[in-house]
Amino acid sequence: MFDTNKKYGILGMARSGIAAAYKIKELGGTAFLSEQQWKDKIPSSLQLMQDFSCEFGGHTNKLLECDCLIVSPGIPLTIPILTRAQAKGIELISEIEFGYQIKAPDSKIIAVTGSNGKSTTASLIHFILEQMGYKSILAGNIGDAFCSYPIHKPGIEFIVLEISSFQLDLVSSFKPDVAVLLNITPDHLNRYDSFEDYAASKARIFKYQDENDSAVLFLDSPVVARWTTNIQARKLLFSLQELQPKAYACLSGKFIHFGLSTIVSIYDLGIRGPHNYANAMAAMLAVHALVPDSEAIGNAVKGFKPLTHRLEYVGSVRGVSFYNDSKATNTDSVRSALMSFERPIRIMMGGSDKGEDFSTLTDVLQAKAQKVYITGNTQDQMRQAWLGKVPLDCIDDFETCLRTAFEEALAGDVIVLSPACASFDHFQNFEHRGEFFKQIVASIMAENEKK
C-alpha cells in the first residue's frame, strides 16, 4: 500500500528517476528530485521544476530530510550523500523495487538478468507472450521505465523486466514470479570491488522468491550453479549440450528440443549464434513456467527479429558483409559474436575501459578472427594483450578504422563491430556508437554504388 505521507527523494533525473517521481505524484505523494548535473544538461528540467521541488549541480543534505531515496542505477552507492543517508537509517531502493511495491497484485512478473543476453531474452519473452495473445509490457533496463506504465492498476497480465546488477543492488522485497539468470561473466569491475561482489548482486534476483516461484537457469554454467545452489524457487534448466537429460530445453544439432515433444529449428528463430539459441531457450522456459503450453510457445517464438546493435546485419558491399554488435561491451559478448560465424571475421574492437582482462579472448581471436582492428581508449591494453598473437591494426579514428577494414577485405569477408568495451570514450552510449557505425557503412555502400 502506497503511503502518501512518506517523503521520497529521487537521485538522478534519468528516465527511471523521472518515471518514479511522476508515479509518486500520480499516487498523491511527495517527491524531491536531485541531480548532479546542472539544469541546462537535463532536457526536461523546466517541466520538472514546475512539477516538483528540485535541485541541480549536486546532491545536498536536503535529501536527508526524506524518508526513502530512490537511486538511479548509474549512481554509485558509495557517494557521500548516500553514505550519510545510510548512516541516518534512510531507506535506499531502486525504481524496480518501488515499482514492485506499488504494482497491482494480478500482474505476473518475469525478470531477466545476466551479464549478456538480457535485452534479447526479455524481448523474446515479451514477443512470445504477445504472439500467444496475452497483454504484456516490456520495461526496466530496456525501453521505458517500469514506473512509466500504469502498473498500479489491474489488467496487465505480464510484466517482463530486464534488470541490471545496479538495479538489483537496491531491492528489498522484489519477488518475481519467474527469475531468469542467463550467465555471469566478468563485467562492471570498475563499479564492484570484485567479481564475487558482482556475481552476488546478480543472484539477488532470487533472494525473495519462494517455492511458488520459478528460476530459469543455464545448466552449462558452473558460476550460475554455484550462486543458485540454495535458492528456494523451482529450477527450470536449459542447456546447449546435446540432449541434456536434466534440462527441459536443450540443443541438438540444428534443433531446440523443448519439453517432451516440441522441436524448433534454429533457422526459424531469426537470431544467430549459440548464445542466442541459449537466450531463446531461456525465454521459452520463462513463459512455460507460467503458461505451460510447449507447442504454443514453440510456434510463438518463430519469426523474432534480432534487436538493433546486437549482431545486427547492416548490409553488404562488394561481397563484404557488415554486422553491428555495439552492445557487446564485455569480453564474453565478443566471444559469443566470434562463435556465431562459420569462418574467421574482421573484428573492430576498443572503447572505454571497464576493468576486464582482454587476454581471455586470445584463444578465440586466434581461431575466429581474420584480423583485429583496434580503436578507442583501450588501444594500449589490447595491443599488449594480443601483439604477436593475432593480426592487429591500431587506428585512433573510428571511421578510419572501419574503412581500413573494408579496404583490406575481400568478397565473402565479414566485418563485425564488437568492441568488448563501453562506449564513453567517444560516444554517448552503445546506441550512439552503433548508429555511427551504420552511418559509415551506409556511406561506403553509397560510394560503391557510384563505381
Image: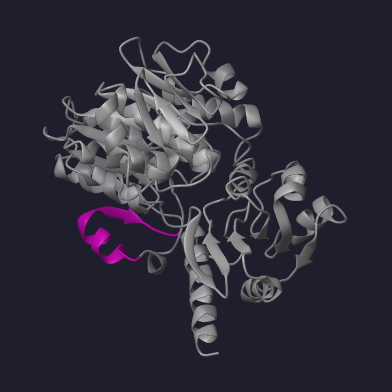
The vertical placement of 215 against 14, above or below, is above
Left or right of residue 33, residue 236 in this image: right
Kindly identify the residue that appears in the image at 49 percent across and 14 percent down.
246
Residue 93: image location, x then y, percent: 38, 33
Residue 393: image location, x then y, percent: 77, 66
The quadrant the N terminus occupies is: top left
Residues in magenta? 43-57
Left or right of residue 348, residue 89 in this image: left
Pick the residue in front: 116 or 252: 252
Pick the residue in front: 407 or 421: 407
The answer to whether residue 95 is visible is: no
| Residue 47 shown in magenta | yes
The answer to whether residue 371 is visible is: yes
Pick the residue in front: 277 or 3: 277
Kindly identify the residue that appears in the image at 53 percent across and 21 percent down.
219
The number of numbered discs placed on residues in the rendered structure image is 0
Kindly identify the residue that appears in the image at 28 percent across and 36 percent down.
299
Residue 418: image location, x then y, percent: 60, 56
The quarter of the picture where residue 320 lies is bottom right
As drawn, which residue projects farthest toward the bottom?
Answer: 450
The quadrant the C terminus occupies is: bottom right
| Residue 364 shown in magenta | no
The quarter of the picture where residue 44 lies is bottom left
As drawn, which residue projects farthest toward the left?
Answer: 154
The vertical placement of 86 against 23, above or below, is above
Pick the residue in front: 144 or 121: 121
How was the colour assigned to the protein in this rendering?
A: one colour
Left or right of residue 423, residue 60 in this image: left
Residue 258: image location, x then y, percent: 38, 25
